[in-house]
Image (spheres, rainbow, N blue to C red):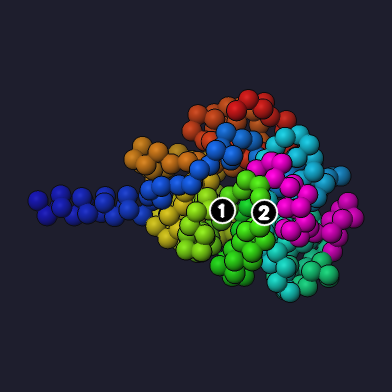
């Protein structure tokens, strides 16, 4: 009997930890859409990722946009994925330690865009998924991004791998659609420690931010936590990052927000 009670308690705790928010804001302008990962870029050959050119191409093609936000050394909210500019710009600068004016240019000669510039360019024409990076202070990154987003009239949602960024939005903007990024498959040591990776993979951090949706690596989404969450809570799901039509077709069965890159997807919703 004691064993059964203990098992019941553990099961209840497990479900408590992985549960998303009970209610979510209206997501009609965001779901059943394809999102260009870091804009409609070409692998940094002529159109760099997270560039105004990539975002303009996505808007012209009618795709939603997924983008990354972090802070510069002087507190500007910029759109760039990596903590360092080396991979994309060819010159190494740690963004959170570098004033905006000193960041190197993107390969097409344009500046690393400010979040405010991207919002002005998109102007509500397509929906946005705004990922808050975890470099430096996730909560501060979230707060600065929210400052820029509050006056924006177009459809958007926010997400982050760091549960404290998601938690910030839960407290500061509870009506804003927020998502917990999570992953399966091999761990990238540069992105997360082993404990954080396990917690994210198994969705155990959901208790902190109580996300309205979960954005999961759809190539490695077959685990107990995902199975239970789907069946017990019927959550809103976003899939990342889809790189071929076959994966997209499979993802459409469970996912309502589809993040893709480097191929031309069938636009069927």
Percent of width and height locating residue 79:
72, 57
Q: Categorize mark 2 by other alpha carbons within 10 Å: few (<14), some (14-19), many (20+).
A: some
Indicate left or right for 132 with 171 as reference: right
Q: Residues within 10 Å of mark 1 (few under 14, many from 20)?
A: many
Secondary structure that dominates the magenta span: loop
Front residue of 44/239: it is 239
In the rendered view, would you say 80 is above or below 45?
below
Left or right: 13 in relation to 51: left
Front residue of 236/219: it is 236
Which residue sits at x=70%, y=37%? Answer: 63
Residue 209 relative to residue 32: left or right:
left
Residue occupying image coordinates x 54% and y 30%? 252
Which one is nearer the viewer's eye here, 81 or 168?
Answer: 168
Q: Residue 259's x, y, as percent?
A: 63, 40
| Residue appearing at x 38%, y 48% in the figure | 22
First along the sequence among labels 2 and 1: 2
Horizontal arrangement in the rendering, residue 144 relative to residue 123 (left or right): left
> Separation of disc 2 and disc 1 at Cα?
17 Å
Number of callouts: 2
Indicate which disc residue 152 carries. 2
Q: Residue 13: percent from the left, percent from the top?
A: 29, 55
Question: Which residues fall within the magenta stretch?
Answer: 104-128
Is residue 166 covered in magenta? Answer: no
Whether residue 135 is visible to the viewer of this picture, yes or no, is no
Rendered-image quadrant of the C terminus: top right
Residue under pointer 1: 159
Identify the mark at residue 64; answer none if there is no mark. Answer: none
């Amino acid at each position: 009997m004691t064993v059964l009670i203990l098992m019941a308690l553990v099961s209840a705790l497990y479900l408590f930890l992985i549960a998303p928010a009970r209610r979510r804001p209206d997501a009609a302008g965001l779901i059943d859409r394809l999102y260009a990962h870091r804009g409609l870029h070409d692998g940094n050959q002529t159109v760099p990722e997270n560039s105004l050119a990539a975002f303009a191409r996505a808007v012209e093609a009618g795709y939603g946009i997924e983008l990354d936000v972090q802070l510069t050394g002087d507190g500007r909210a910029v759109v760039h994925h990596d903590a360092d500019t080396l991979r994309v710009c060819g010159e190494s600068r740690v963004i959170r330690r570098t004033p905006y004016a000193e960041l190197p240019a993107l390969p097409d000669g344009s500046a690393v865009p400010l979040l405010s510039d991207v919002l002005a360019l998109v102007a509500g024409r397509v929906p946005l998924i705004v990922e808050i990076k975890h470099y430096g202070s996730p909560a501060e990154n979230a707060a600065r991004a929210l400052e820029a987003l509050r006056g924006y009239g177009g459809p958007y949602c926010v997400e982050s791998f760091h549960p404290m960024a998601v938690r910030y939005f839960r407290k500061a903007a509870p009506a804003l659609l927020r998502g917990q990024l999570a992953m399966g498959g091999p761990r990238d040591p540069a992105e997360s420690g082993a404990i954080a990776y396990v917690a994210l993979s198994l969705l155990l951090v959901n208790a902190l931010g109580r996300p309205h949706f979960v954005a999961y690596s759809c190539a490695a989404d077959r685990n107990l936590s995902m199975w239970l969450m789907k069946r017990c809570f019927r959550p809103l799901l976003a899939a990342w990052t889809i790189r071929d039509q076959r994966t997209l077709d499979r993802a459409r069965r469970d996912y309502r927000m589809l993040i893709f890159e480097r191929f031309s997807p069938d636009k069927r919703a």
